[in-house]
Image (cartoon, rainbow, N blue to C red):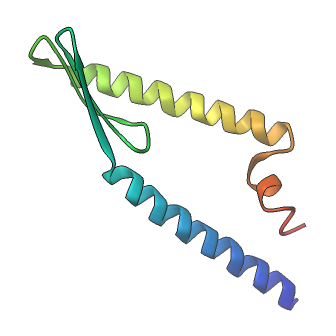
């Protein structure tokens, strides 16, 4: 029983570490500009701003970010099906 509590604490700690890393990555930004296109991306690979020929294109930001989110979900599902994912990374904690 103690082992289950220890495993739960380890998972809680990992979750907190992941959240802290997420916040740090959101602070990392890079802006790239070429041929009238300006894009700003954060460390989570989310597009924060897109401008084409001086016109802000929030509609494209939304579409691209949604597409990236969906492909990340599909990739995570494939990893889980292949035996990877969080349980594989944690070495079977909770089994």
Q: Position of residue 41 (x, y in %)?
A: 33, 35
Residue 61, image quadrant: top left
Residue 94, compared with residue 59, is above or below; it is below
Which residue lies at the image location 20% right of the left edge and 20% below the top edge?
57
Which residue lies at the image location 40% right of the left edge and 44% below the top edge?
43
**Residue 42 placement, left or right of 93:** left
Which residue lies at the image location 44% right of the left edge and 29% below the top edge?
66
**Residue 8 placement, left or right of 43:** right
Residue nearer the viewer, 5 or 53: 53
**Residue 14 placement, left or right of 44:** right
Residue 33, compared with residue 85, is above or below; it is above
- Report the quarter where the N terminus lies: bottom right
Q: Position of residue 62 (x, y in %)?
A: 33, 27
- Report the quarter where the C terminus lies: bottom right
Residue 95, compared with residue 37, is above or below; it is below
Q: Position of residue 21 (x, y in %)?
A: 47, 60
Q: Position of residue 58 (x, y in %)?
A: 23, 25
The number of callouts visible is: 0
Residue 13, image quadrant: bottom right
Residue 4, image quadrant: bottom right
Extreme-bottom residue of the structure: 2
Which residue lies at the image location 85% right of the left edge and 62% below the top edge?
91
């Amino acid at each position: 029983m103690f082992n289950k509590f220890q495993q739960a604490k380890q998972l809680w700690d990992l979750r907190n570490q992941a959240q802290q890393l997420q916040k740090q990555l959101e602070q990392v930004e890079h802006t790239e500009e070429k041929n009238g296109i300006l894009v700003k991306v954060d460390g989570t690979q989310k597009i924060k701003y897109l401008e084409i020929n001086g016109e802000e294109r929030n509609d494209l930001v939304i579409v691209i970010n949604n597409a990236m989110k969906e492909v990340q979900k599909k990739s995570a599902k494939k990893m889980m099906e292949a035996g990877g994912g969080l349980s594989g990374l944690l070495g079977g904690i909770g089994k």
